[in-house]
Image (cartoon, grey):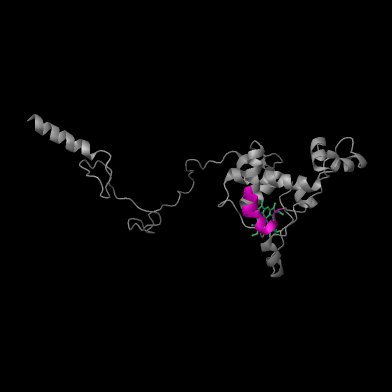
């Protein structure tokens, strides 16, 4: 009898840690195996035969209540905001740069001039030219309007909200402002240590720095939705 106990115990111990390509023996099925529909599968129960049911009109699904209009629509009180609603730090800008170079540079070019490869070819074939981000019109756009252009498209430009998540869209907006600053900052406003590091000190000395650093004059935008 004692020997039998040892044999059984040995067999059970032998099962541990072993691997098998067969599914394990499932004595108690519980609810582990149920019928379910896969994405896009047909379900004859419904008249339209779609297993994936459309959202019931007038209802809001969990996590779809986008109440924060600043974060989700770039607006405050219905008008485009000029503030970025997420904390802007180096990580966000680096993320923005990476996303910009993937999603925007093909048309807008890595420097934002509007001379990306797609645009260069496309314009010859009738494509509407992307604007230069360093021109006064896009520079005067509030960040909310740039966010809106990415999220909902702008005339000939398609929406990128399906490809680019909410926070990445704001990261791109923040980086776009960096690109603009890189082309439009007067030498007098460059911090002294950076100017020295770049060897621009002579230039700074000979260029009188404006006393109260004036912001670039906002030029009224002819674009739509400008309050
Ligand atoms: C397929 C080419 C293409 C891509 C990719 C693209 N754009 Fe554009 N974009 C355009 C074109 C074309 C216009 C000009 C549309 C017009 O004036 O009808 C434009 C216009 C804009 C404008 C100005 C909108 C306005 O109201 O005048 C902004 C800002 C902009 N794009 C940002 C971006 C950003 C940021 C990305 C990356 C997420 C991006 N675009 C990706 C083609 C593109």
Image quadrant occupied by the N terminus? top left
Which residue of the protein is positioned furthest toward the bottom in this rendering? 125
Say which of 122 and 81 sits in front. 122
Say which of 93 and 134 sits in front. 93
**From this viewpoint, is residue 12 visible?**
yes
Residue 58 as seen in the image, left or right of residue 129: left
Magenta span main SS: helix
Determine the image quadrant of residue 110.
bottom right
Residue 58 as seen in the image, left or right of residue 121: left
Q: Position of residue 99 (x, y in %)?
A: 62, 49
Q: Is residue 69 magenta?
A: no
Q: Position of residue 135 (x, y in %)?
A: 79, 53
Above or below, comparing residue 219 to residue 115 in the picture: above
Q: Residue at x 48, y 49 (%)?
A: 57
**From this viewpoint, is residue 153 visible?**
no
Q: Residue at x 65, y 52 (%)?
A: 101
Determine the image quadrant of residue 7.
top left
Determine the image quadrant of residue 69.
top right
Q: Quadrant of ligand 1?
A: bottom right
Q: Residue at x 14, y 32 (%)?
A: 6
Q: Is residue 106 magenta?
A: yes
What is the span of residues highlighted in magenta in the rendered image?
98-110
Say which of 216 and 20 sits in front. 20
Say which of 71 and 50 sits in front. 71
Above or below, comparing residue 79 to residue 126 in the picture: above
Q: Position of residue 26 (x, y in %)?
A: 22, 43
Q: Position of residue 64 (x, y in %)?
A: 51, 43
Residue 175 as seen in the image, left or right of residue 33: right
Residue 191 as seen in the image, left or right of residue 207: left
């Amino acid at each position: 009898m004692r020997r039998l106990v040892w044999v059984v115990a040995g067999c059970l111990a032998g099962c541990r840690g072993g691997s098998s390509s067969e599914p394990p023996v499932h004595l108690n099925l519980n609810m582990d195996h149920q019928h379910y529909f896969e994405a896009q599968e047909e379900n004859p129960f419904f008249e339209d035969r779609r297993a994936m049911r459309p959202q019931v009109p007038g209802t809001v699904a969990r996590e779809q209540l986008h109440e924060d209009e600043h974060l989700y629509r770039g607006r405050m009180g219905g008008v485009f905001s000029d503030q970025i609603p997420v904390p802007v730090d180096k990580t966000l800008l680096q993320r923005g740069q990476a996303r910009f170079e993937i999603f925007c540079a093909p048309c807008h070019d890595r420097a934002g001039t509007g001379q990306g490869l797609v645009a260069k070819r496309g314009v010859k074939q009738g494509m509407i030219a992307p604007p230069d981000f360093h021109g006064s019109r896009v520079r005067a756009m509030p960040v909310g309007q740039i966010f809106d252009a990415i999220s909902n498209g702008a005339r000939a430009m398609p929406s990128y909200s399906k490809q680019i998540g909410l926070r990445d869209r704001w990261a791109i907006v923040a980086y776009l402002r960096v690109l603009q600053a890189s082309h439009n900052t007067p030498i007098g406003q460059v911090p002294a240590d950076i100017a020295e590091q770049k060897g621009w000190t002579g230039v700074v000395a000979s260029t009188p720095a404006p006393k109260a650093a004036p912001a670039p004059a906002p030029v009224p935008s002819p674009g739509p939705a400008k309050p």
